[in-house]
Image (cartoon, helix red, strand yellow):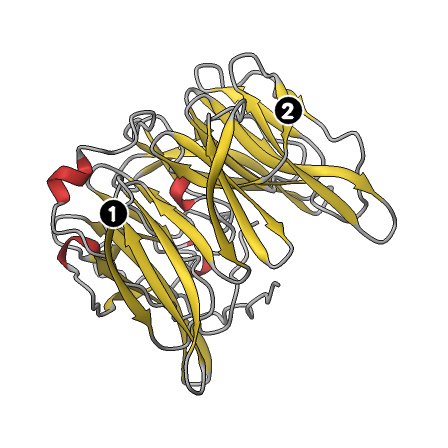
């Protein structure tokens, strides 16, 4: 399950993209929007987002799905019911991502989410994959009930992948009623622990973390790569940081430094990429790499963002202002999305903001899109994670 990382998150960043056409021509060749999981959203500290050719589907409070039109950057709940106020989860049609905290995905013109049946005998929710039209209508159960909880899932190159606490499965998209195929299980498992985490995919490779050693007190995790065609799996020496120019970037702490390497997607070869002081880090979107660097000012610790193009030429740098918590919010080549909670009449309400990278230079201003919590329910408190 995705976890929101901080209370009242207001991450700030700046992007420069005055040469959009040139940069877009350099998009990673191995990525296909129609068939591949959007790898740049696959980290644990954001709300679920699905990108389509025309817009974005973003899941907010209580499973509401908000659609953002790329041409106008207008955001509206995905509900075509006349005069609907979108605040009733039982009557508004936009509340269809009931398990939306785990994922939402666009795939070949359709929208996919997890829905569930409530089993009265077991008193538990039983998930299944559901398919919706791009306008949010319909809603068809396309897999059998999955007799287990689902921790994470995505669709990638003709397969529906999902994990429970202990195992990784897949089902072919052309035969979704077939029995799930178990493709990985850790040799050691820790009790009360999600033993498979950090699912991602790029090209023909699946990436994840899994327990390698476990005892009563703690579990040690390793990073793994699997060829989705042969299902051959091997452990990586470093953790997955991202993908850049159709290569895999990995990272590992080395004393008080963060060591980054880059190489083949199956990690058969890698070379030194960059070394940063611990506390600084790299982040990647489809067309640029971003480096956040901590700087000690006269009275406070400041952070600065550096943006580089595909040839590692620095585009610009800018100081990050405000209540800066973690550089972990959602972004792609065009937009930077921010999710901010605010107190309204004593209740937490979640708002969606964005920055248009194509109209930004070394300054930026967050633009408010819409409220992501419309139901007349209290939002659960944030889960603070280290």
Neighbourhood count class around disc 1 (C-alpha, 10 Å): few under 14, some 14–19, many 20 upward? few
The answer to whether residue 374 shows anywhere in this view is no
The location of residue 300, given as percent across then percent down, is: 45, 83
Closer to the camera, 305 or 146? Answer: 305
Depicted 170 relative to depicted 221: above or below? above
Depicted 272 relative to depicted 59: above or below? above
Split into 4 quadrants, where in the image is the C terminus? bottom right
The Cα atoms of the two marked residues, 1 and 2, are separated by: 34 Å
Q: Which residue is mark 1?
A: 313
Neighbourhood count class around disc 2 (C-alpha, 10 Å): few under 14, some 14–19, many 20 upward? few
**Which quarter of the figure has residue 196?**
top right
The answer to whether residue 84 shows anywhere in this view is yes
Secondary structure of the residue carrying tag 1 is loop
Closer to the camera, 9 or 283? Answer: 283
The location of residue 194, given as percent across then percent down, is: 69, 45
Instruction: Identify the mark nearer the N-term, 1 or 2.
Output: 2
Depicted 356 relative to depicted 35: above or below? below
Q: Residue 175 got which mark?
A: none
């Amino acid at each position: 399950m995705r976890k929101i990382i901080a209370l009242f998150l207001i991450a700030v960043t700046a992007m420069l993209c005055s040469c959009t056409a040139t940069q877009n021509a350099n998009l990673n060749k191995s990525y296909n929007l129609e068939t591949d999981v959007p790898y740049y959203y696959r980290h644990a500290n954001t709300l679920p987002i699905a990108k389509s050719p025309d817009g974005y589907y973003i899941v907010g409070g209580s499973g509401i799905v908000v659609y953002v039109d790329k041409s106008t950057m207008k955001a509206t709940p995905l509900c075509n019911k006349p005069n609907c106020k979108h605040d009733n989860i039982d009557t508004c049609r936009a509340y269809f991502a009931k398990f939306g905290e785990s994922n939402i995905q666009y795939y070949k013109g359709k929208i996919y989410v997890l829905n569930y049946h409530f089993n009265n005998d077991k008193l538990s929710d039983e998930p299944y994959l559901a398919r919706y039209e791009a306008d949010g209508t319909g809603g068809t159960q396309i897999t059998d009930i999955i007799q287990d909880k689902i921790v994470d899932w995505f669709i990638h190159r003709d397969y529906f992948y999902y994990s429970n606490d202990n195992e990784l499965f897949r089902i072919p998209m052309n035969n979704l009623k077939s029995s799930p195929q178990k493709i990985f299980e850790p040799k050691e498992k820790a009790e009360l622990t999600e033993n498979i985490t950090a699912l991602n995919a790029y090209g023909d490779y699946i990436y994840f973390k899994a327990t390698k050693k476990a005892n009563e007190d703690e579990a040690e995790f390793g990073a793994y790569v699997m060829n989705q065609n042969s299902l051959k799996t091997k452990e990586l020496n470093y953790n997955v940081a991202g993908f850049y120019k159709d290569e895999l970037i990995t990272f590992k702490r080395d004393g008080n430094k963060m060591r980054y390497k880059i190489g083949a997607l199956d990690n058969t070869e890698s070379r030194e990429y960059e070394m940063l002081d611990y506390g600084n880090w790299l982040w990647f979107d489809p067309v640029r790499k971003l480096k956040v660097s901590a700087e000690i000012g006269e009275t406070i610790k400041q952070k600065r963002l550096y943006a580089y193009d595909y040839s590692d030429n620095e585009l610009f740098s800018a100081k990050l202002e405000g209540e800066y918590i973690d550089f972990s919010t959602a972004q792609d080549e065009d937009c930077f999305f921010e999710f901010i909670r605010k107190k309204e009449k004593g209740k937490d309400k979640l708002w969606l903001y964005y920055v248009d990278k194509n109209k930004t230079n070394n300054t930026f201003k967050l633009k408010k899109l819409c409220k992501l919590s419309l139901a007349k329910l209290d939002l659960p408190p944030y889960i603070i994670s280290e």
